[in-house]
Image: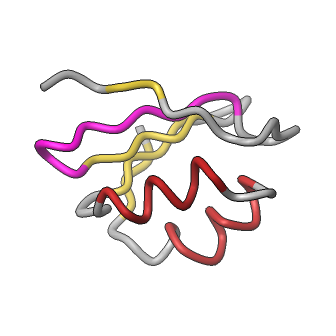
């Protein structure tokens, strides 16, 4: 399956996010770089989408996954 756009609360730092449920890869794009987070389960992505602060949720719940700068 291809990457799917993830809706999230508007953020001054996060520009976009996509997720591939087959590979559990979340890609988050910032103004100057993009990062791939590996092994992110669907429930964490759902929480990211529903969080009142996308940046806070990313920091607290997603940055713990293996990360690669793209």
Q: As drawn, is 67 to the left or to the right of 33? A: left
Q: Residue at x 54, y 74 (%)?
A: 61
How is colour applied across the structure in the image?
secondary structure
State the residue in front, 12 or 66: 12
State the residue in front, 34 or 16: 16
Q: As drawn, is 45 to the left or to the right of 19? A: right
- Residue that protrudes farthest toward the right in the picture: 12
In the image, the segment drawn in magenta is: 15-24
**Residue 2: which quarter of the image?**
top left
State the residue in front, 27 or 19: 19
Pinpoint residue 8: horizontal percent, then vertical percent: 66, 40
Pinpoint residue 52: horizontal percent, then vertical percent: 79, 57
Pinpoint residue 20: horizontal percent, then vertical percent: 25, 37
Above or below for 5 versus 66: above
Quarter of the N terminus within the rendering: top left
Quarter of the C terminus within the rendering: top left
Q: Residue at x 37, y 46 (%)?
A: 26
Q: Residue at x 60, y 29 (%)?
A: 16
**In magenta segment, residue 68:** no
State the residue in front, 70 or 47: 47
């Amino acid at each position: 399956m291809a990457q799917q756009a993830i809706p999230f609360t508007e953020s001054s730092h996060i520009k976009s996010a996509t997720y591939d449920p087959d590979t559990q890869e979340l890609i988050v794009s910032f103004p100057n770089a993009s990062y791939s987070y590996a092994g992110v389960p669907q429930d964490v992505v759902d929480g990211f989408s529903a969080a009142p602060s996308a940046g806070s949720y990313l920091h607290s719940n997603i940055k713990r996954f293996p990360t690669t700068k793209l």
